[in-house]
Image: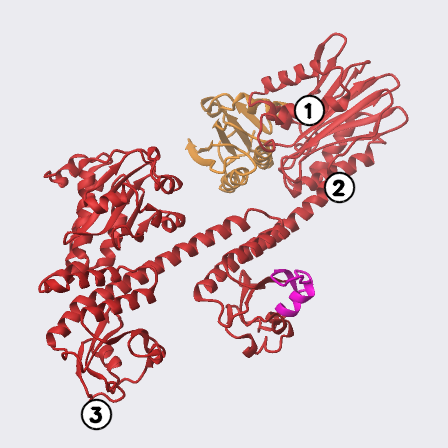
Amino acid sequence: MGMDYREQLVGATTPGSKSALEFLGFLQHLSRETAEGNLARVVDAAVELPIKHLRVDKSVLLCCPALGKPYFPLAFRNVSQSFLDECHLLAGDDIVDWVAASQSPKVVENVPSLSTTSASVYAREQVHSLACIPVVAQGETLAVLLYMCSFPVAFTVWEIEVMNTIANHVAAVSRLKQTDEGRTPPQIGPLLGRLREALWTFADLNELLSRTLREALALMQADSGSVMLHESRGCRVAASYGLGPSASQEVHRARDTVAMRVIASRKPILLHGPVGAQEYPGAVLRPEIASAISAPLRGRGAMLGLLNINRTRAGRAFNDRDLAFVVSHIARPLAVAIENLKLHEATKAQTRYLRDLYEIARTITSTLQLDAVLEMIMSRLRALIVSDVCGLLLYDTETGRLNVACGCGIPDGAELDYADLMMPAGKLPLSRLRPVVVPDLSAHHAHGHSPAAERLGLRSAVIVPLMIKRKRVGFLTAYRREPRGFPGTAVKLLIGMAELAAIAIENARLYERQSGIANLAQTMLTPGALDPIPHFEIGCKYAPAHQVGGDYYDLIKLDKHKFAIVVADVAGKDVSAAAHIAMCKHSLRAIAEHITSPSKLLRKMNRLIYDNTEPEAFISMFYAILNTKNRTLAYSSAGHEPGILLRTRMKTIEYISTPGILLGVLPNATFCERITSIKLGDILLLYTDGLVAALSPDCEIGLSKIESTLIESALKSAQELANSIHELAISRHTGRPPDDIAIVALKGI
Amino acid sequence: MNADTQFNVVMHDSVPVVQIDGDLDHYSTPEFRSVVSELIQQGHKTIIVDMSAVDFMDSSGMSGIIFAAKRLSAVDGRLSLVNCNPRTIRKLSIGGLTKMPSLLAIYPSLEEALQHPLEPQGKAPT
């Protein structure tokens, strides 16, 4: 493929040449990083760049420890944890294995059509197309780059060229390649190969160190040795061979020991025994050791530790050439491998942390019921953090007393058991707002004599305060049977979880409080079933769009034969609307008996509302007085939707209304009234504008739907009729309708 | 339920025209009220509201209109609505607001509203 991909790139810029030029800049940057030997950055760029600039949305750099052995991901972008966990399943198929063996790139456009073992792994990751590129150095496949795309894509020649270039950069930067350079005697080739294999051990740091050490000793024909890691306490022996079991616990602290000198000077040391106490105090070579090499493991910036390799008197003493060989062929690549492993571990841990936190947030914010929120917090806590007992303490919002809100983990545990265990957390000083990690409960002052912890055999704990607006509202607690049972990652997750839990709990409490008010308003104001009227049937339906609605209807018995029917709509949908309804409902009930004319009543109500509400408040109202004796209906409307009257015998529809302004707008508004009759079988439908709006955006269509339903359902009872009209209105909406709906149906029987 | 309703005030010969782009509902009415209040505070007695881009107005929206109309009528001014769609007209008409010229004037177009000035700015009506 001799074409210049740069030319292709600039020529084939579909989204605009800016991104292509930007990409060239990145490639130049990649070359610089390669020249400087920044493996980690090059590896990072190898998975990042194609996502930014090519038609790739997921990428993984898979290391090949040896042909036929499981692959493992060194770097990745946008792939799920389950894909990473299943990477080993990719071995043995004709994509990754084929590419590793043939050292040629492979493109699969239609991954779902594959029938190989790996097909399901890709399917779960929703991969539709992929390109697999080998990373080859010195004739050996070190890794493969998997570039995946969730939609069908045919990668162009230049895209493959660009991927190859990236793979070449990764190969070039690998210090393992440098290891092969120069003067490797042919006979140690296989040993070096095994060492390289050991260096690609990514599963576990201890395994990497002990395997590399063994192979290094074999390569150097040495008898014993160790890898020490530089930590805050000094240099700790992390892996040893041939030094006896005591060596594995050693920590070198003194500044004049060999280890600390190598760390301080960053230079390797060649020692010949016996080493005198004056030269290296505290570092007397064991009598059987004749010569030793101590090479620093230099990371980027910090010192990671050192590698010690010893020969007994039986062998040839190490010379400067051996020293140089150990530094460049073993210590340097080992340092890179350790760093890569740490990077890999950190990335994995961070990914897990974020995924867990996302999962927690998604679950515990999915409900506003406090009990359900608490339950979900507990279940997430148990699922994500290995703890034997965990629980939540919350301060009572009224009394301020700390109570056990929930807990789990104590077999047959009653609330009292959890209280015994967790209450000492409340003894923390009020100023204490940060998490407390108790590595050993028996030594902690607050938990010192907790009989509950002792009885349950709990040894370590984490107590995280739950904070809302800098106020402590409770504690999240977790306990384990092992001392020091909570690693840093678990504590970090607990802190993240406590933040989310506090928000979820506060939201649930706020919601409970508000819904408490709303529920009260609703139970007091929501119109219920209406009393029966002789010779008439009355049916009603009420559906608020929010918890507190702004519509209401009522039936007031004025005397033996007279009944007042009222349907009203209050502006707004919140608690103030509820207050207006309350005022309206009770004033109306108080004055209705004394005013027998609907128009006069509306005039009185208008004045009341005008004087007692804020300027923008208004109420539309239809007020009618039904006389059951002579079957007449006197009515008056204040800016309300007209009533729909079905003359059943004639099958005709009448709209009954009177001109009149909304209540509360003008101080001296007057209203007029009319009288009609409700004959046997006639149906009067009174409603609020929410019904018309819910039926259709075009009110004409909405009204004609009501008309036809009325005619069709003329034989139904008044209540059935109200129900069918309500069903008709809500059938257009998936959830609640956008506005309140109130329906009253009156039928002459 | 459109939270992104935009309010623009354009001056036509010292008469402010409030252009509403979006629904006038529970969510946008508070802003409408504050826009109108500010204009009244600046001394404007005639305010025209261009409703051409209002698709939906609920009872909260209507309370905003009534608020503006009442405030202006209290200072002997007047609110005019122009370019209302049939749904809005029906709502205003049922509410009895289309027959209250002292409170609220409704014109089919902005030009017509501008041809019927209430009074010169700052003077009492005759």
Instruction: Residue under label 1, please give it.
Output: A660
Mark 3: amino acid: Gln
The disc, 2 or 3, on the residue closer to the chain's N-terminal end is 3
Of A492 and A246, which appears nearest the observer? Answer: A246
Instruction: Write the residue at 63% across / 17% down.
Output: A705
- Asked if A509 appears above or below A427 in the picture, the reply is above
Mark 2: amino acid: Met
Image coords of residue A738 (percent x, y):
59, 32
| Element assignment for label 2 | helix
Instruction: Write the residue at 75% across / 34% down.
Output: A527
Q: Look at the image and give the colour of chain B.
A: orange
* Residue A524 badge: 2
| Element assignment for label 3 | loop
Is residue B98 among the parts visible in the rendering?
Answer: no
- Asked if A553 appears above or below A479 in the picture, the reply is above
Q: Look at the image and give the colour of chain A.
A: red
The magenta span reads: A395-422
* Screen quadrant of the C terminus of chain A: top right
- Asked if B11 appears above or below A181 in the picture, the reply is above
Q: Is residue A48 left or right of residue A538?
A: left
Which residue extends farthest front?
A314
Q: CA distance from mark 2 to mark 1?
A: 29 Å
* Pointers 2 and 1 within a single chain: yes
Image coords of residue A438 (percent x, y):
52, 72
* Residue A669 badge: none
Image coords of residue A275 (percent x, y):
20, 88
* Screen quadrant of the N terminus of chain A: top left
Is the residue marked by circle 3 packed among few (<14), some (14-19), or many (20+) residues within 10 Å? few
Of B109 and A647, which appears nearest the observer? Answer: A647
Residues under numbered marks 2 and 1 in contact, where contact means CB atoms less than 8 Å apart? no
